[in-house]
Amino acid sequence: MAKSATGTRGRSRASGDQRQRIVDETIALAEEIGWSRVRLRLVAARLDLSLAELQTQFRDLDAVADAWFERAWQAMLAPVPEGFSDQPVPDRLHLLLMRWFDALAPHRTVTHQMLSEKLYLSHPHHWVPMIFNLSRTVQWLRDAALLDAEGRRRQVEEIGLTGIFLATLAVWRRDGTPDQEKTRRFLERRLRRADRAMGRLGRHTRPRSADAGH
């Protein structure tokens, strides 16, 4: 039984490693020829895989793009610094959102091309999943930032954070400043402004004391 469990873990790890290799190679190819010209057969050939082997990991190129954005989620949700829950809400959100942008920054141009492809008019089948992914990103962001508001306040937070994220994304896509300084400043201003607006709806919900859980 132990051998069987060990074997299953080994196969799972190997499959995960292969998925990462496919994502890395796809990004590398996109840097060379542009995302719109990437074909999975080219990625498979560079990795000495058959298309059948590659298809067991990704259903299509859009799924590879989703795996790339998954890395940004993982970066955003990594353990937070000590004392995180004591920081003001805008600071918590700024730290988490910049983790997302920083994770994708090494391949900003390709990431921009991915998003443009997802929004292409002839690809409506990508729109609904993208909307759900955006909503999921905001939900994870709220949870990681220790935001526990309910009812109307929660709705306002979700709408506001979605707008801030999209506005910052538009700035980030064209940000050539060192260490993404333009994006950082823009995001900081937007979060401070939103914090003042939320203050008019009432006092902030007290954050959970859960540094260890994040």
Image: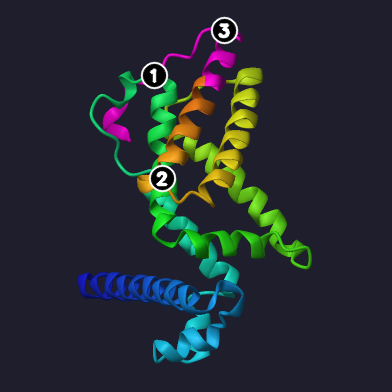
Residue at x 45%, y 51% (from the top left corner): 176
**Discs 2/1, front:** 2
Dot 3 falls on a residue whose secondary structure is loop
Q: Quadrant of residue 90?
A: top left
Q: Amino acid at mark 3?
A: Gly
Considering only vertical position in the picture, is 193 above or below 77? Answer: above
Residue 200 counted in the magenta span: yes
The first of marks 1 and 3 along the sequence is: 1
| Disc 3 target residue | 202
Q: Which residues are magenta?
A: 193-214
Q: Amino acid at mark 1?
A: Pro
The first of marks 2 and 3 along the sequence is: 2
Q: In the image, 166: left or right of 184?
A: right
Considering only vertical position in the picture, is 184 above or below 12? Answer: above
As drawn, the label of residue 180 is 2
**Discs 2/3, front:** 2
| Disc 1 target residue | 88
Compute the Cα span from label 2 to label 3. 33 Å
The first of marks 2 and 1 along the sequence is: 1
Compute the Cα span from label 1 to label 3. 15 Å
